[in-house]
């Protein structure tokens, strides 16, 4: 154990990362997205439709979850920037948080036999642990990205394996999860997915998470007041983070809507949701390479505007299909836009961090990813509110099974297509206001 700690302590990155290091670092995208998207896509459906917890109760619990997660992000980001250890600023947090994160994720899907109020209490406690561990691990992994990859060229190339792994995690988490819980039940699904997450996080931690030697002046602690002032007065960050919130809300609403869409609008078996979600994410994999080329030949801002436009136009297609095959074809078009969003959002944020470092003399990856996380976690709250309002207003009643009133189909299609389009249009406007129009700062 001592030898392992010494080896981790002595690792530092002084040049561009090797291909092996880039791939290992990229592997972290698989478990983090697997957990994120599985939670976003199925937790409301699991507690409302399978456990028969009232939708309003679940919405309130999700709001509490979103508030806690949002509050943790800037706090963790600032602490990560300020900490000094022989192992670096980010590595200790990641190493300590991996096991609690995986265990808490599994327990979300394995509640004991309790009445509805007991299930909500279980949800709140377990998800609180999950939130804390998730922020500790994922924020620090994200903060390593602009530190490891230093130019738009490096970031565009280095982000390809990470986002491909992320999409594969989404496929297993959102398209594979229905097949798993159909075959082995929700607890079995939880154990399988948690085991996969643990293996991939361990590989990424030991093989690709390597910090650079940051100059002492660039990494010294800033006062809390200065942190907030520089962050929220950044003319590039404010439109970026608002646009990111709109994009994340749009995606979260779509993922939460798909299980309802498959069962109550298309009249298909629950497991066929895998085809809809799989169409999105499988298409997004080659799209990652496409958007990597686009950003290298244009600029992060231009490429992001194009990808948001493609995504927004495509989601409107969900109004039309009456079969799973038709909806899957719409998902192919949606996947092209999703690939761009996954590839470009962190490239743009890394550019903002470089610009801030030029102006302030400080490397503040943790602060920016923390505040970004604080704002975009609002997508969870907005998703829960949208789902609760639409389902309640349309007359959805879980006790009726498939015998829902006709208004439910219209409400679900509105939730899957029109509402995401509205959020996407707002995102495009925000990114159009983004002021950095060059490739590198």
Image (tube, grey):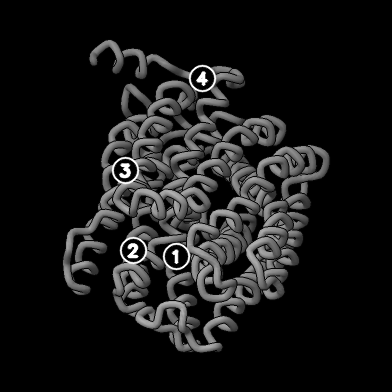
Q: Earlier in the sequence, mark 4 or mark 1?
A: 4
Disc 4 designates what residue? 13
Measured Cα–Cα span from mark 3 to mark 1: 24 Å
**Circle 2 or circle 3, nearest the eye:** 3
Residue closest to the eye, 358 or 106 = 106
Task: State the SS at label 3.
Answer: helix
Residue closest to the eye, 104 or 112 = 112
User: Pointers 3 and 1 in contact (CB under 8 A)?
Assistant: no
Disc 2 designates what residue? 65
Q: Residue at x 71, y 55 (%)?
A: 332
Residue 384: percent from the left, percent from the top?
Answer: 43, 72
On the image, which quarter does residue 91 sit in?
top left
**Circle 4 or circle 1, nearest the eye:** 1
**Horizontal placement of 137 versus 265: left or right?**
left
Measured Cα–Cα span from mark 3 to mark 4: 35 Å
**Horizontal placement of 283 versus 384: left or right?**
right
Task: State the SS at label 4.
Answer: loop
Q: Earlier in the sequence, mark 4 or mark 2?
A: 4
Residue neighbourhood size for the residue with mark 1, other residues' Cα within 10 Å, grouped as few (<14), some (14–19), many (≥20): many
Q: Residue furthest right?
A: 297
Task: State the SS at label 2.
Answer: helix
Q: Residue at x 38, y 30 (%)?
A: 199
Measured Cα–Cα span from mark 2 to mark 3: 22 Å
**Circle 3 or circle 1, nearest the eye:** 3
User: Pointers 1 and 2 in contact (CB under 8 A)?
Assistant: yes
What mark, if any, has residue 191 been given in the picture?
3
On the image, which quarter does residue 422 sit in?
bottom right
Residue closest to the eye, 225 or 97 = 97
């Amino acid at each position: 154990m001592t030898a392992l700690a010494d080896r981790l302590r002595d690792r530092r990155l002084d040049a561009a990362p090797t291909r092996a290091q880039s791939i290992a670092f990229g592997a972290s995208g698989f478990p983090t997205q697997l957990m994120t998207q599985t939670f976003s896509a199925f937790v409301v459906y699991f507690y409302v439709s399978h456990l028969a917890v009232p939708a309003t109760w679940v919405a309130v619990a999700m709001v509490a979850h979103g508030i806690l997660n949002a509050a943790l992000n800037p706090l963790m980001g600032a602490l990560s920037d300020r900490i000094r250890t022989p192992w670096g600023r980010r590595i200790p947090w990641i190493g300590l948080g991996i096991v609690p994160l995986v265990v808490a994720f599994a327990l979300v899907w394995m509640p004991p036999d309790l009445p509805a109020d007991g299930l909500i209490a279980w949800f709140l406690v377990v998800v609180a642990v999950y939130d804390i561990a998730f922020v500790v691990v994922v924020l620090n992994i994200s903060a390593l990205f602009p530190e490891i990859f230093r130019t738009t060229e490096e970031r565009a190339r280095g982000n390809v394996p990470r986002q491909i792994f992320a999409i594969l995690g989404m496929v297993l988490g959102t398209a594979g999860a229905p097949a798993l819980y159909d075959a082995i039940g929700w607890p079995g699904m939880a154990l399988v997915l948690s085991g996969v997450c643990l293996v991939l996080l361990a590989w990424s931690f030991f093989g690709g998470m390597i910090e650079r030697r940051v100059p002492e002046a660039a990494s010294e602690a800033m006062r809390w007041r200065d942190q907030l002032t520089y962050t929220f007065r950044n003319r590039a960050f404010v439109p970026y983070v608002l646009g990111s919130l709109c994009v994340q809300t749009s995606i979260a609403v779509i993922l939460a809507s798909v299980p309802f869409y498959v069962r109550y609008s298309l009249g298909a078996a629950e497991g066929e949701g895998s085809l809809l979600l799989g169409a999105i994410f499988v298409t997004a994999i080659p799209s990652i390479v496409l958007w990597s080329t686009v950003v290298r030949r244009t600029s992060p801002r231009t490429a992001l505007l194009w990808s948001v436009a493609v995504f927004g136009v495509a989601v409107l297609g969900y109004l039309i299909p009456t079969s799973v095959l038709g909806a899957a074809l719409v998902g192919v078009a949606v996947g092209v836009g999703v690939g761009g969003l996954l590839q470009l959002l962190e490239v743009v944020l890394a550019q903002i961090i470089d610009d801030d470092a030029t102006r302030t003399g400080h490397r503040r990856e943790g602060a920016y990813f923390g505040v970004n996380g604080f704002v975009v976690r609002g997508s969870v709250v907005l998703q829960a509110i949208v789902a609760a309002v639409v389902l309640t207003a349309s007359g959805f009643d879980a006790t009726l099974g498939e015998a829902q009133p006709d208004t439910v189909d219209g409400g679900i299609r509105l939730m899957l297509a029109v509402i995401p389009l509205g959020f996407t249009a707002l995102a495009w406007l925000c990114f159009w206001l983004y002021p950095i129009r060059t490739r590198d700062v």
